[in-house]
Image (tube, rainbow, N blue to C red):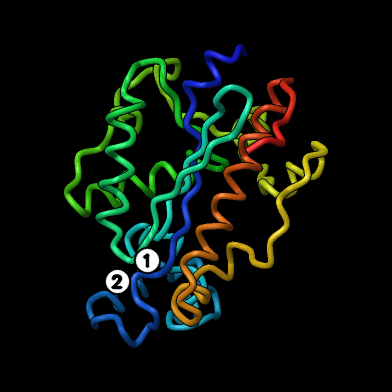
Amino acid sequence: MNSSTLQKILFIDIETVPQAKDWNDLDERTQILWDKKTMHQRQELSAEKFYAHHAGILAEFGKIICISCGLVHQGEIRVKSFYGHHEEKILQDFCQLLHENYSKSDHLLCAHNGKEFDFPYIARRLIIHQIPIPKLLQIQGKKPWEITLLDTLDLWKFGDYKHYTSLDLLAHILGIESPKDDIDGSQVAQIYYEEKNLDRIKNYCEKDVITLINVFLRMNHLPIIHKM
């Protein structure tokens, strides 16, 4: 992979939280639907207890509070984030970035576990907000070689669909020093609703994007980047 191809890739990571802080804040109909949706996953847990830790990962019951984007330009990593309390505005701004800078057929999006999480989550929330889906995320009816979505987890699986490896673990075994942070993904909802610290979440998301870029570089036999 040469530098011109690398510059056509936008690396992304998203942070999501439950749409409501607490189970009791949901209307009765949503509670019933959540109960049905998660019945088999919950096992012995109540729908209420399961909500706090899992609602954010389902696009029907969660929302996006941050989308961090990174690119490689002239040997340096550049990062930009769209974040806040208003998901519709976050999505609109992200889509504007794609429309203005990543709308050609040779442009690509890359995320870790993006095909299972980031990409479909964004697309579903766009539909809910009635925002047109950008060309890069329109994969229906496309042939495999026409799809413009890259996934470092998918690259690492080598066809093993049962194999999950976190970005943190992948970075570690590839000899990439992940930016140290005092939080992980499981704490995002608590930091958002209780600490009300969006900047802390944004910084965490951006650090994941930097790690993602260097993992992708290492997997493509390219030198990692320390400069920002």
Residue at 34% in and 87% down: 24
- Up/down of 125 relative to 199, above or below: above
> Percent position (x, y) of residue 87?
30, 59
Check contact, mark 2 vs mark 1: CB within 8 A.
yes
Q: Is residue 159 found left or right of 131 in the rendered image? A: right
When asked about the image quadrant of residue 60, the answer is bottom left
State the CA–CA distance, disc 2 to disc 1.
6 Å
Q: Is residue 175 found left or right of 35 in the rendered image? A: right
Q: Mark 2: which amino acid?
A: Leu
Residue marked by disc 2 = 33
Query: In the rendered image, which quarter contains the N terminus?
Result: top right
Q: How many marks do you count on the picture?
A: 2
- Up/down of 133 relative to 59, above or below: above
Residue at 62% in and 39% down: 212
- The secondary element bearing badge 2 is classed as helix
> Percent position (x, y) of residue 149?
45, 29
Q: Mark 1: which amino acid?
A: Lys
> Percent position (x, y) of residue 3?
59, 15
Residue at 34% in and 21% down: 142
- Up/down of 149 relative to 193, above or below: above
> Percent position (x, y) of residue 162?
64, 42
Residue marked by disc 1 = 37
Q: Is residue 158 found left or right of 101 in the rendered image? A: right
Label 2 Cα neighbours within 10 Å, binned few <14 / some 14-19 / many ≥20: few
